[in-house]
Amino acid sequence: MAVLIDAMRVLSALNVLLLLGLGYVWGRNFYRFRSKHTLGLLVFAVLLLAENALSIVFFVFNFEGLTAWVTDPSFVPTIAQQAMLTLRALEFAGVVFLTWVTWD
Amino acid sequence: MEAVLWYVLTGTRGGTNRVRILRALDERPRNANQLAEDLELDYKTVRHHLDVLEDNGVLEDSGDDYGAIYLPTDQARHHWDTVEKIIDQVE
């Protein structure tokens, strides 16, 4: 089901955008305050950003033919793709909420 | 309280201005208008930050509507070394 993979791609891209925003706020604050707390937030944003950027490399740029494997239902059945999408969607919801509380 | 202070002052977009407001109020309690003037900030921005700091138990107001004077809560005073540590980083 290519549409499930497409949904994953879109969510990864949205996560990247939000995490860039969060990384900007926390990076600027860390530059300013040098506190352990802000460093923690910044490292978190950078690692989650890396995770989503890698996901885009794997599933959009067809790294090592990976996309062909994941989209082929004989290798990855629909239920497995749905599970992957669910995890991505939950992550997106978490990042949206964090952006909302950080943006004020 | 300590985690709240770190978060509200260094974890959010408006943290730097909140630190400036807190430092000004520590010097001398003021109302929103005076703060906006003294810190050269938009009145609405100051109002927003005051509300956030109040919601988080860092500030309290004297309750006289528009002229309300803001000052740090006892709870914030109790953890003032943390506040000072953060304030020190801003100029």
Image (cartoon, rainbow, N blue to C red):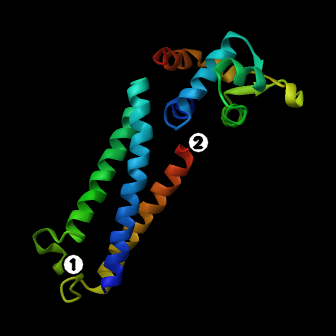
x%, y% of residue A66?
Answer: 15, 73
A44 or A31: nearer the eye?
A: A31
Report in which chain the residue with disc 1 lies.
A
Does residue A65 lie above or below B5 as drawn?
Answer: below
Quick one: label 1 or label 2, which is nearer the N terminus?
Answer: 1
Report the disc number at residue A70.
1
x%, y% of residue B63?
Answer: 86, 28
Q: Which amino acid does label 1 sit on?
A: Val
Task: Say which quarter of the image contains residue A34.
Answer: top left
Q: Which amino acid does label 2 sit on?
A: Asp
Name the residue furthest top: B27
Report the disc number at residue A36.
none
Of circles 1 and 2, the one toward us is 2
Q: List the residue tagged with mark 2.
A: A104
x%, y% of residue A81?
Answer: 31, 79
Task: Say which quarter of the image contains residue B32.
Answer: top right
Q: In which quarter of the image is the C terminus of chain A?
A: top right
Does residue A99 lie above or below B79 as drawn?
Answer: below
x%, y% of residue B46?
Answer: 69, 31
SS category of the residue bearing label 2 = loop
Task: For residue B39, say whether it is visible.
Answer: yes
Marks 1 and 2 sit apart, C-alpha to C-alpha, by 39 Å
Identity of the residue drawn at 30% across and 84% down: A2
